[in-house]
Image (spheres, rainbow, N blue to C red):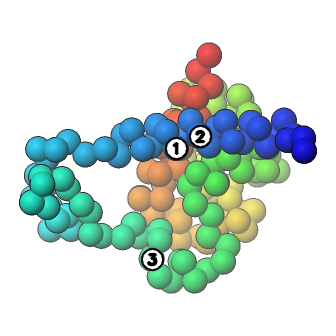
Amino acid sequence: MKISTATTSFFTVASVILSAGIASAQANSEKISHNANVANTTHGRVITTSVNSYMSPSNIANSHVMQPFSLVYFAYQGNLASQGIPSGKTLILQHQRGSVKAEDVVKAAVNAKRIPNQFLYNPNYLSEVDVQLTSLEKTFAH
């Protein structure tokens, strides 16, 4: 069975981004939080108890919710070109230069009816999209 170049590229990008996310998610064993939304365990690890607002029950029930990783990959593939978002390395370069921001990608996805309008005003979702765009930069910084 042959795997297409696009599928291989997707799995490569996904594995690098997920590896980076897993590495950065490891908590410092001595970290203690004073935030009410965070629970401290007896082992000193911090566990968040709040749910990201973009994953609220009302959004989960909505079948057209696109996670930040999927949205950025969707844009990278050129699926938001009709909304003015460049694809591939051009997307990465323009994000590095500041001419394409997370807000631009989210607005394009809203205009393309890929995600609900409320995500334009969700700082958590916008931040996650920015993290994913930055991960693409790190992945393809050769």
Q: Is residue 100 visible?
A: no
Which residue is the site of mark 3? 56
Looking at the rendered structure, the kind of residue marked 1 is Leu
**Of marks 2 and 3, the one in the foreground:** 2
Which residue is the site of mark 1? 18
Do the CB atoms of the residues marked 3 and 1 lie less than 8 Å apart?
no
Do the CB atoms of the residues marked 2 and 1 lie less than 8 Å apart?
yes
Looking at the rendered structure, the kind of residue marked 2 is Ser
- The part of the image, by quadrant, that contains residue 91 is top right
Vertical arrangement, residue 98 with respect to residue 110, above or below = above
Counting from the top left corner in percent of width and height, residue 95 is at: 58, 33
Vertical arrangement, residue 139 with respect to residue 109, above or below = above
**Residue pictured at 20% horizontal, 42% vertical:** 28
Which residue is the site of mark 2? 15
Alpha carbons under labels 2 and 3: distance apart = 26 Å
Counting from the top left corner in percent of width and height, residue 32 is at: 10, 52
